[in-house]
Amino acid sequence: MILNGDLDWTSLQAQQSVRTLISTIQIKMKPGDSLVTFSSLRVLYIEAADVAALVESLHQLKHLRYLALLDTHISVLPGNIGKMKLLQFLDLRRCTKLVNLPDSIVMLSQLQFLYIPNIHMIPRGFRGLTDIRKLIGFPAHMDGDCCSLDELGPLSQLKNLFLNELENVSAASFAANARLGEKMHLIELFLWCTSRLGDDGLIKENQGVSEEEQRRIETVFDELCPPPSVEIINIKGYFGKQLPRWMMSTSTVHLNNLTILFFSDLACCTQLPNGLCQLPYLQFLQVNHAPSIKRVGTEFLQAAVAAPFPRLNNMTLSKMLEWEEWEWEDRVQAMPRLEKLRLINCKLRHLPPGLASNTRALKQLTLQYVQHLSYIGSFPSVVELTVNGCPDLERITNLPNLQKLTIIDCPKLKVLEHIASLERLVLEDYMMEKLPEYLRDIKPRHLQLFCRLWLLSAVAAGQSGIEWDKFSKVEHVKAYARDGDNQRKWYVLYTRGDNCKLDSNISSSTIFEETLSSSMVMHKDLSLCTK
């Protein structure tokens, strides 16, 4: 039975034989309502509803295998939940008021899937749930002289494991007791600490990390070495200076099945791991928020390795706010299969020569808020390039296979040349007063323009306007100016050919209103300056 409309719980009581009940709506309940009449239920899925009245009767669902209470207001589970002996799946995501599990949960011997991302305490005896395959949101916490990680040791069937609050682990010995390296079925591993970074990507005020804290978390993570079977690793909030030894040391890297690797919120880490380049099946690498990394040196590629990053396909290095230097020499051949590269929010001045000369499979290149970059060129295989918010960028050249180019807020860009295959150009800049001169030197088939209304009106003037020579040779032009949140309020549509056509919804009154509005804003700014 699937419920998708307003419903009173009382009206369901007659459905005594139902085995599956799925509800994604708010159900009207009153004190005394229960699940007693649904004794045949095997599957119960309730989302976005206040089901507190039903919780106490959960234990009466003797045949229930699947229980999901998502985004509900429950604050406790019944103490007798251990009576649900056949329960295999329990999902408590987005139940933000539920922070503890009842002790009797350790009696659910058939439990295989458990989602508990908001829980802060794990009862002792959890180690007895040896059938668990998927455990999402397991909190690390101390309980006297014991640590919750001790409970993970016997859970040898785990395939997916998400550990959080690892900053609470007081000694490496507790991490060793989790025996992650022995879990030969483990495929996905999340190792999370509470982030020390603020919204600006820097360490929060009063959240500084002492050297002692750095050393402690380093030793804890060193003992959380996964087995060779792991395919996905996600590390977040780590505040050690160096990443775990099992990533840094080239002699101990044994993650031969690892294909996807995420790092985020690395508050104190000063360098990327030098062992990753050996991983034979690594395809996806993402680093997000690593404000202490200033340099990516030759050790990242390990020149002595025959083919560093042999299968890496997609790499994103994002919000490494102080990153200024990337060393990669021409002679060092690496990343032969890299197709997508994104560099976001850093201080790089130059792209390394080895990147352009060795990444022969690179198809998509995105450079966003790369503050000091002045030149992009000599990428023979790139077909799609996006540059966004690069204030010092002056030249883009020698991209013979480039088909799509997106330029957003790059005011110093003057040279665009040797891009003969260009099919589509997207240009967005609401501050520019005229179309860039480089439009005369290129011949894309399609031009999409987002600009201020005043400039759009000059485009709308067609042959009689001062911008005509810059876009008239383009086959198709779509140009827009915004009005508030409507990015395409005003438009100019142009098609070149024997039946040349130019269409626009801009009128002289529109231009007058824009001019008046701009003048009023300027007058207000000047008034503020003279106060």
Image: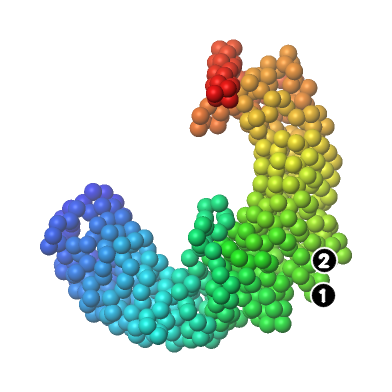
Q: Position of residue 121 (x, y in %)?
A: 36, 74
> Seen in the image, is 271 located left or right of residue 203?
right
- Say which residue label 1 marks: 304
C-beta proximity under 8 Å, tags 1 and 2: no
Near mark 2 (Cα within 10 A), the count class, few <14, some 14-19 or many ≥20, is many
Identify which residue is drawn at 83% across, 32% down: 441
Foreground residue, 83 or 189? 189
Amino acid type at image mark 2: Gln
- Residue closest to the far right: 331
Identify which residue is drawn at 76% across, 37% down: 413
> Seen in the image, is 254 located left or right of residue 80?
right
Identify which residue is drawn at 37% across, 86% down: 128
Please tell me the numbered disc located at residue 321: none
Q: Position of residue 528 (x, y in %)?
A: 55, 25
Q: Position of residue 405 (x, y in %)?
A: 72, 41
Amino acid type at image mark 1: Ala
Q: Nearer the viewer, mark 1 or mark 2?
A: 1
Please tell me the numbered disc located at residue 333: 2
